Amino acid sequence: MSGTSMDGIDAAFLETDGQAHLVPGPHLNASYPEQLRSALLQLPAKGRDVAGPERELTDLQTEAVRRLCADHGIDLSTIDVVGFHGQTILHDPARRRTWQLGDGQRMADALGIPVVNRFRQNDLDHGGQGAPLAPLYHQALIRAGAIAEPVAVLNIGGVSNLTLVDGGLLFACDCGPGNALIDDWVRAHCGVPYDEGGRIAASGRIDHRALETLLSSAFFRRQGPKSLDRNAFSPEPVRALSAQDGAATLTAFTAAAVAAAAQRFPRPAREWVVVGGGRCNAHLVSALRQRLRAPVRVAEELGWLGQAIEAQAFAYLAVRSLLKLPLSHPGTTGVREPVSGGVCWQPSAAPP
């Protein structure tokens, strides 16, 4: 899995039947080379080379699978399928377009293992938003842990998305910015890739006028399910602020957007669980605790591997794709009826 933060690769093992059986295994995280990340952030753009970055990230993610196996003494041939989300460089559900770079055939040939990718397009083709796709895995995790419902799982990556699980109700949507605006801001103003622990934001002051402008986006007036592109929000309202105040305001924007989404829940959550990179931002988690009306815990407090959840989710969805089980539901993406998806690539030759 490579999320909209575009910071690197999360790889994880999962033993599953695509339904209730879940046995998470080891995982790893690998950063993108800075040159590749910079190239990806400029895509898609007319005249830019797409084939080169696609080959590079496919090979990096192929190597992540090999490394994960080697590090944990796992025979590559015992893996049934690889779920390969690819790197989103465009997501435009209004035009039924989504674009994840990643060559499934190239990976399948290199590993000698079937690879499933292109998870989102079939949902779009059937009237859905194409995102978020992790809710079915979130639901399976909650049920496996016998966690009292209703529970909201909040994934904070480049954008933030949430899943509400309550008996027969499964509701999900993207709810606003996640780490992307904050990361881009501190990279440009402080020369660091992200605001570690939220320390930069914690040293600044929220500009409430700028925050109000950010929250005035029409996106927040729409009912879910709904989804976002990484670049859906402009940082223009904080342009004149100091590095610290800009980081504080953008962090408050992420938290306020989540709280606004919670107000539109069909039912209130009794607790929240935060997964994804944003769970490591203590200042952001504190801001969520101040704004939400239920206890907020991070994944590790439930025994989950917070950094691995999204990668595990696409392993789970790859198995569901092979079994022709739904990957999305009307309540998670707005699709007209539950639909499967994904494209399975069979290796055409023995791996080198």
Image (cartoon, helix red, strand yellow):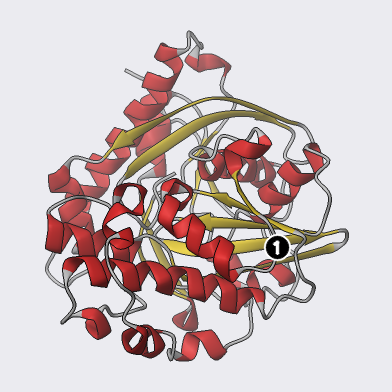
Residue positioned most to the top? 73
In the foreground, 74 or 247: 247
User: Is residue 239 placed above or below 150 in the rendered structure?
Assistant: below
Q: Is residue 139 left or right of residue 115?
A: right
- Residue 62 point in image, percent of width and height: 36, 31
User: Is residue 92 placed above or below 75 in the rendered structure?
Assistant: below
> Which of the 4 image quarters holds residue 245?
bottom left
For image coordinates 53% across by 40% down, the residue present is 306
Answer yes or no: is residue 349 visible.
no
- Residue 251 point in image, percent of width and height: 38, 66
For image coordinates 58% across by 58% down, the residue present is 154
In the foreground, 331 or 212: 212
Q: Quadrant of the C terminus?
A: top left
Q: Is residue 133 left or right of residue 100?
A: right
The disc labelled 1 sits on which kind of residue? Ala
- Residue 35 point in image, percent of width and height: 12, 46
Q: Which residue is mark 1?
A: 294
Total residue callouts: 1
In the foreground, 284 or 103: 284
For image coordinates 11% across by 69% down, the residue present is 47
Q: Quadrant of the N terminus?
A: top left
> Which of the 4 image quarters holds residue 265?
bottom right
> Which of the 4 image quarters holds residue 337?
bottom right
- Residue 332 point in image, percent of width and height: 67, 67
Q: Answer few, some or many: residues within 10 Å of disc 1's Cα (few below 14, many 20 plus, some between 14 and 19).
A: some
Q: Is residue 154 left or right of residue 248?
A: right
For image coordinates 15% across by 82% down, the residue present is 240
- Find numbered disc 1 in the image and state the secondary structure of the residue it sits on: loop
Answer yes or no: is residue 41 visible.
yes
User: Is residue 277 placed above or below 315 in the rendered structure?
Assistant: below
